[in-house]
Amino acid sequence: MLTLVGKTRLVMAKAKLKGLVDDELLRILDANMDEAPARRRTREAFKEIQLGIDHILFKTPSDGLKMKELYEVNSRGLEIFSKSWIPEISQLKAVVCFCHGYGDTCTFFFEGIARKFAQCGYGVFALDYPGFGLSEGLHGYIPSFDKLVDDVIEHYSKVKDNPEFSGLPSFLFGESLGGAVALKVHLKQPDAWDGAILVAPMCKIADDMVPPLIVTKLLIGVANVLPKQKLVPQKNLADAAFRDLKNRELTAYNVISYKDKPRLWSALEMLRTTQEIERRLEEVSLPLLILHGEADIVTDPSVSKALYDKARTSDKKLKLYKDAFHSLLEGEPDETIVQALDDIISWLDEHSRKSDTS
């Protein structure tokens, strides 16, 4: 069930869409999205509308791309949604495996990012974590961050073992919470990847986004009794993450994202994970490209700087973007989005060639 905050954000989202979509679609948004079937129905109803919105990411053509959506039951018995974007060319440069952010899905803004990478010669793969997007599980609930990471490893190991892709360089690409997922994947598989691109990685949640210490301690105690309850105070992430006002309004079309207060155990798992990653920055040994907006108030840019300083690898690059907020590839003015995507593709091109010759 939605909390008052969740209902308020739903009402706001519907208000932004009123007049842009018909009443039948607006009624679909009233569904309880706690379980995957409702999220899948909603996404199916809005899919074509999403692809037509006025955002630079959705202007990348899909010509010459093979796109495939799949539902597969994993070893934990959970039905996982995944998608791939493969260019119809004779030789791929590399495989890029995406880890999405908190509350998100690989079916909205990432659609445009994936098309851009695929048009540049990369095989792109993505999945929705259990409990997020189109995958099975209670919406927004992370009972174990480690098991979530294991689910990601299981899925991408199958991709990389496919004879079609097994000889190619492989790169992790994580945004926000997905940056933490990517780092945890690397720490569990230190020699399995040729590099990682981390956009505003959640190595530490910014102090402004964390409740006061006394509230945090109280919530930890309650989490042991009511782990699935939505009680963690949180600012509006779209306001905090999107600098460009037009792009901020378009988040209303991300109809299956989790917009309510974080569930208690999910918040606790994310907090523990960021604390672990902060302690283990020196163990990061793969080639790194880190991108972060200097004005990010969701994840702390200073920890990206610490990751750059402390990571064991000598092959590392940190790109900071003046005045940019958290959603660097989705929420900035077009010129910043284009620059960040170009920076990523240039790095991938360079490191794909390096991997081919090593």
Image: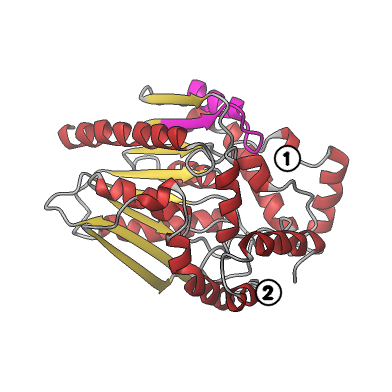
- Which part of the image, by quadrant, shows the C terminus? top left
User: In the shown orientation, is residue 64 left or right of residue 273?
Assistant: left
Q: What amino acid is labelled 2 in the image?
A: Asp
Question: In the image as oriented, which residue stretches furthest toward the front?
Answer: 19
Q: Which residues are magenta?
A: 289-313
Q: What amino acid is labelled 1 in the image?
A: Met
**Circles 1, 2 touching at the beta carbon (< 8 Å):** no
What SS does tag 2 mark? Answer: loop
What SS does tag 1 mark? Answer: helix
Which residue is located at x 58 percent, y 54 percent? 251
Q: Which residue is identified by label 1?
A: 209
User: In the shown orientation, is residue 98 left or right of residue 181?
Assistant: left
Which residue is located at x 52 percent, y 38 percent? 332
Residue 290 part of the magenta-drawn span? yes
Residue 152 numbered mark, or none: none
Horizontal and vertical percent position of residue 203: 58, 36
Horizontal and vertical percent position of residue 9: 72, 59
Q: Which residue is identified by label 2?
A: 30
Image quarter for residue 88? bottom left
